[in-house]
Image: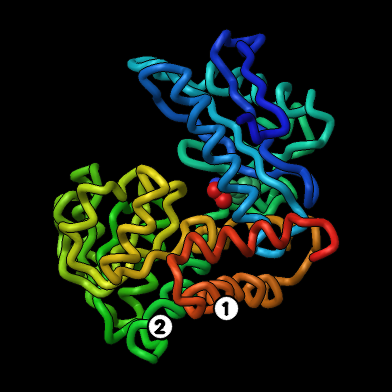
Amino acid sequence: MFTHEELHVRAGRRTGLPIVVAVHSTVLGQALGGCRLWHYDDWRDGVEDALRLSAAMTAKNALAGLANGGGKTVVPLPPGVNVDADTRRALLHDVGDTIEALDGRYGTGPDVGTGPDDMVVIGERTPHVFCRPAAHGGSGSSSPGTAAGVIAALRATVARLDGDTELGGHTFAVVGLGSVGADVAGRLAAAGARLVVSDVRPDAETLAAELGARWSRPGDALTAEVDVVIPAALGGILTAELVPALRCRAVVGPANNQLAEPAVAGLLHERGILWAPDYVASAGGIVHAVASELYREPEDVVARRIERIGDTLTEIYAAGEAPDVTAEKLVAARLTPGTR
Ligand code: PHE
């Protein structure tokens, strides 16, 4: 069944590269979700990703209390194609035109492979763009907001595990040291937590040393004996095969679409491992962008809004069933007219 509102795939007028925009839902308002610029073996895999990621954005925005639906842009680069600076600009203009043609039903922001400077270029073709740098009138990188939301989620998690919200007495494995993962690791190190960290790029090892963290290979970090494993890289890493090998008590992180298949949430629950639905734990970035740019809230008010991610998670954990089941009920309730 096709459960999205719209799916657009077009060749960029300037670059001929495929641009995919999926609008999953505008029931709560303008669909929002970032622009992913990434390599895929086949552009069709990028379409699949856009469909999945946009649906997750509907859940993310609904549970974060935003008056926004979910959407996503994916620019699937063919294997081996690397865009130079000029092509990148042209490509981002192609993305901007594609978004502008949707008449405001969808707005974009940064995601894997794009950042605030790219939003400036997209913004030359459409006003429906978030997270431009402050000098360009935007709220800047969404990464610090996402990291703050993950910290709120981790506090709620250790409270559920051990009845206290002190992160310092706990151990964590951060899988992926991109802008969000590195920020989360830095905040945990500052809180005095013991850390294992990993990244596919070997040069990230210097960051591990700076943080006083134990460096590990990504596969080993996932199965490290820690309180919480924090997926902070690409999605699909929680597989049915991985679940029996896990030695953590909880999995809570910012990576979108962590489950290789939906049934893995049930397997984690059966093993007694707490899982924070990724669309709950990762909402801090978009909350920061929307609250700053649309609601014009000052930073301290925005920070309190991000903190509420912890309360949402506490409510989900308290239900005692598999967290995705509870979270999906909450999403459905929010999307049903008359209940919001
Ligand atoms: N990459 C962010 C996410 O996955 C998306 C985002 C979109 C952030 C729009 C800010 C604004 O949640």
| Residue 27, placed above or below residue 1 | below
Q: Quarter of the image holding residue 234? A: top left
Mark 2–mark 1 Cα distance, whole angstroms, equals 11 Å
Quarter of the image where the C terminus is located: bottom right
239 and 69: which is toward the camera: 239
Residue at screen point 23% across, 60% down: 197
Q: Earlier in the sequence, mark 2 or mark 1?
A: 2
Q: Is mark 1 on a helix, strand or loop?
A: helix
User: x, y (%) of residue 126?
Assistant: 77, 31
| Residue 119, placed above or below residue 219 | above
User: x, y (%) of residue 95?
Assistant: 65, 24
Residue at screen point 39% across, 65% down: 275
117 and 98: which is toward the camera: 98
**Could you tell whether 27 is left or right of 92 in the image?**
right
Quarter of the image where the N terminus is located: top right
* Disc 1 residue type (three-letter): Asp
Badge 1 is on which residue?
311
| Residue 214, placed above or below residue 203 | below
Residue at screen point 21% across, 51% down: 242
User: x, y (%) of residue 167?
Assistant: 35, 82
Whether ligand 1 has any atom under 8 Å from the Cβ at mark 2 is answered as no
Q: Is residue 173 visible?
A: yes
Residue at screen point 73% across, 62% down: 291
